[in-house]
């Protein structure tokens, strides 16, 4: 059998599965193979250009390198949206095959010159984006640049409602001391930005002004800058954050279009398109009528949910979910297992349908200890005490992690442990990202909840702290069925974190550089206009290492960007900033708060949810707003807000 027919045989197999999984969404996709593609092949960066000749009805392409070598055997199926081609590499060729969704390619390539005959001959995952298509969808551009060979900065360019150019600038690290050189974000004066040329000025303290002049070619940008007229110095960088929401508000219709498209793109990148299980899941009841956990220990000192006024009048049911996933390579069946606990009020009345909390734990936690009042993640217990249906799902790390990012202290006896990756039979690595697997588990849990007769499926809440806040952020961004999201302790600037913490990469992607595609604020923008309470502490050390003197400054930048997406619906988005209390050593740390009575100090005044007050510059040139921990005491607890929002 020839090379082309072998390649086409695999592509046709992929095509059938892809078409079955995506249905009508594939038909509405306006992207195609033509354009300039920026490919990430296991860290190796490759750019190719593909065009279509209407006369010959054939595709042609070449590498965008100095030699501009031609691509071979370019095949495209518009029905299944699969693309394959052969690209020169060193002294031979590599073979590529993948599927395109809204200008994003996800697939695999070979790693030697051997002619592939089976899907497993393509061992290297690849991701790519089509700048020709992506650039038609939005006016904003984001670049990571290196200044004078030392400072690393994020430059954002966009336009305001009147069409005038605007921008922002943030140094996030230096080559000498990493994120210790982090600075606040500055608003720019952009005097020129025409797609090919840019001129902008950053005004620093006093009368110091830095003026940058640059030229944009493809995904690259470079130029020189001067500080108060001093000798020019060089700067250069490359395009990042291509799915960025933008710097200006969109109409509700524009926002919805961006959200629908971006969800498809992210699902394609991190969860192989969000496949439905082949069959209804098997749900095994491992234990029933399990009483609430109680061992006589005192409450967690941060557990301000007024538990004494709300007894544990519920029982738990231990569940194991088993899913058979479709295999796009037809190499065998892949099974996914999830484990959790379902809490139900003892006094549930016949026909009653209650709101539900979907609870996700953080590092070293479990679904089990989300019901333990002295543990770090007791929010499942708090909601169950208030007559919510609660489903707590185990969240963990992959078994093959070797970066020591999380001590393997997940407690197997409680049902949680390190979780195997979704790896299709015959392969040694996963097409999925770790957060894609976690978010998929949550989304399938929602499917299950919607089948339960005592659940009001229109009143679903998702909450989590730390790693749980990370998963809450992803799942709420990708699943509009979640009515209220409460991500806590996950306010991360990917650039800063990348330069700061080389071990703790639970947020990072394996098959792509997450910074090429999204920032945390884009995930928040995907939640608009739904209700969000974003909890962070003003002394939270988890994602705060860096030079910025205010640990919460990164979160305030996330909030500012997210509120652009919320627009007139900004009241639906609350930044709950915990203020540090030195007497109790609590509140402003890495905790989940409720704003109600502390059982260890019931006489302490109830402040309720403390809302961050200053969320944008107070005047032109103001950067100190990012470092203000000013809040207003609402007097309303987390449960007060939820009750109002669920009406």
Image: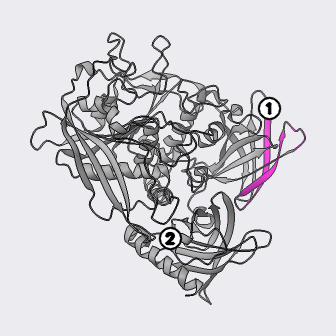
The span shown in magenta is: 209-232
Residue 390: x and y in percent read: 27, 38
Q: Place residue 555 in its image quadrant.
A: top right
Identify the element where label 1 is drawn.
loop
- Residue identified by numbered label 2: 30
Whether the residues at callouts 1 and 2 have beta carbons within 8 Å, the answer is: no
Residue extending furthest toward the front:
413
Q: Is residue 284 left or right of residue 79?
A: left
Residue 479 seen anywhere in this rendered image of the structure: no
Residue 14: x and y in percent read: 46, 73
Q: Is residue 75 magenta?
A: no
Residue extending furthest toward the left:
350
Of pointers 1 and 2, the one earlier in the residue sequence? 2
**Total of numbered circles in the picture?**
2
Residue 538: x and y in percent read: 52, 24
Q: Which mark is residue 231?
A: none
- Quadrant containing the N terminus is bottom right
For the residue carrying disc 1, how many other residues have a C-alpha within 10 Å: few (<14), some (14-19), or many (20+)?
A: few
Q: Is residue 357 left or right of residue 559?
A: left
Identify the element where label 2 is drawn.
loop
Residue 582: x and y in percent read: 50, 13
Q: Main secondary structure of the magenta part?
A: strand
In-front residue for pair 641/554:
554
Residue at position x 58%, y 34% in the image: 554
For the residue carrying disc 2, how many other residues have a C-alpha within 10 Å: few (<14), some (14-19), or many (20+)?
A: few
In-front residue for pair 514/634:
514
- Residue identified by numbered label 1: 208
Which mark lies nearer to you, 1 or 2? 2
Q: Is residue 376 above or below residue 161?
A: above
- Quadrant containing the C terminus is top left
Residue at position x 36%, y 11% in the image: 604
């Amino acid at each position: 059998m020839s090379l082309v027919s072998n390649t086409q045989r695999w592509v046709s197999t992929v095509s059938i599965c892809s078409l079955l999984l995506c249905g009508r969404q594939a038909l509405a996709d306006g992207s195609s193979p033509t354009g300039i593609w920026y490919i990430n092949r296991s860290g190796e960066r490759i750019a190719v250009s593909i065009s279509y000749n209407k006369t010959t009805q054939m595709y042609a392409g070449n590498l965008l390198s100095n030699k501009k070598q031609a691509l071979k055997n370019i095949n495209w199926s518009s029905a299944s949206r699969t693309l394959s081609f052969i690209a020169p590499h060193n002294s031979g060729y590599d073979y590529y095959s993948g599927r395109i969704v809204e200008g994003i390619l996800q697939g695999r390539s070979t790693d030697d010159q051997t002619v592939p005959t089976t899907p497993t001959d393509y061992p290297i995952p690849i991701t790519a984006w089509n700048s020709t298509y992506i650039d038609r969808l939005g006016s904003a551009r984001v670049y990571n640049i290196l200044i004078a060979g030392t400072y690393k900065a994020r430059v954002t360019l966009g336009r305001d409602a009147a069409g005038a150019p605007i921008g922002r600038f943030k140094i996030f690290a230096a080559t000498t001391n990493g994120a210790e050189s982090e600075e606040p974000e500055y608003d720019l004066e952009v005097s020129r930005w025409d797609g090919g040329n840019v001129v902008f000025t950053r005004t620093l303290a006093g009368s110091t002004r830095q003026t940058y002049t640059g030229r944009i070619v493809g995904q690259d940008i470079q130029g020189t800058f001067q500080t108060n007229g001093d000798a020019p110095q060089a700067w250069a960088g490359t395009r990042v954050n291509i799915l960025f929401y933008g710097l200006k508000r969109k109409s509700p219709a524009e926002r919805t279009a961006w959200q629908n498209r971006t969800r498809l793109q992210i699902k394609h990148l991190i969860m192989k398109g969000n496949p439905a299980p082949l069959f209804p899941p098997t749900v095994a009841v491992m234990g029933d009528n399990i009483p609430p956990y109680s061992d006589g220990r005192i409450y967690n000192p941060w557990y301000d949910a007024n538990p004494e006024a709300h007894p544990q009048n519920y029982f738990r049911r231990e569940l194991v979910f088993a899913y058979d996933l479709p295999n796009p390579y037809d190499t065998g069946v892949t099974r996914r297992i999830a484990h959790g606990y379902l809490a139900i009020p003892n006094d549930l009345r016949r026909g009653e349908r209650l709101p539900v909390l979907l609870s996700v734990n953080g590092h070293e936690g479990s679904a089990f200890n989300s019901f333990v009042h002295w543990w770090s993640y007791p929010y499942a217990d708090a909601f169950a005490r208030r007559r919510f249906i609660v489903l707590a799902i185990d969240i963990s790390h992959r078994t093959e992690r070797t970066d020591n990012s999380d001590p393997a202290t997940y407690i197997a006896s409680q049902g949680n442990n390190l979780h195997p990756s979704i790896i299709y039979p015959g392969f040694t690595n996963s097409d999925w990202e770790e957060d894609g697997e976690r978010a998929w588990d949550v989304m399938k849990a929602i499917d299950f909840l919607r089948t339960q007769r005592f659940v009001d499926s229109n009143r679903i809440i998702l909450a989590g702290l730390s790693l749980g806040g990370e998963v809450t952020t992803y799942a709420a961004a990708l699943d509009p069925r979640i009515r209220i999201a409460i991500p806590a302790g996950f306010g991360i600037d990917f650039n800063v974190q990348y330069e700061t913490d080389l071990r703790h990469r639970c947020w990072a992607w394996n098959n792509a550089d997450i910074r090429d595609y999204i920032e945390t604020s884009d995930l928040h923008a995907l939640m608009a206009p739904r209700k969000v309470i974003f909890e962070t502490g003003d002394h939270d050390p988890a994602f705060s290492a860096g030079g910025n003197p205010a640990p919460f400054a990164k979160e305030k930048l996330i909030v500012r960007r997210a509120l652009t997406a919320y627009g007139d619906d900004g009241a639906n988005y609350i930044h709950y900033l915990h203020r540090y209390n030195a007497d109790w050593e609590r509140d402003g740390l890495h905790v989940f708060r409720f704003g109600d009575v502390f059982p260890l100090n019931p006489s302490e005044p109830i402040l309720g949810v403390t809302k961050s007050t200053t969320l944008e510059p107070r005047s032109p040139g103001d950067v100190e707003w990012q470092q203000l921990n000013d809040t207003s005491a609402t007097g309303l607890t987390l449960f007060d807000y939820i009750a109002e929002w669920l009406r």
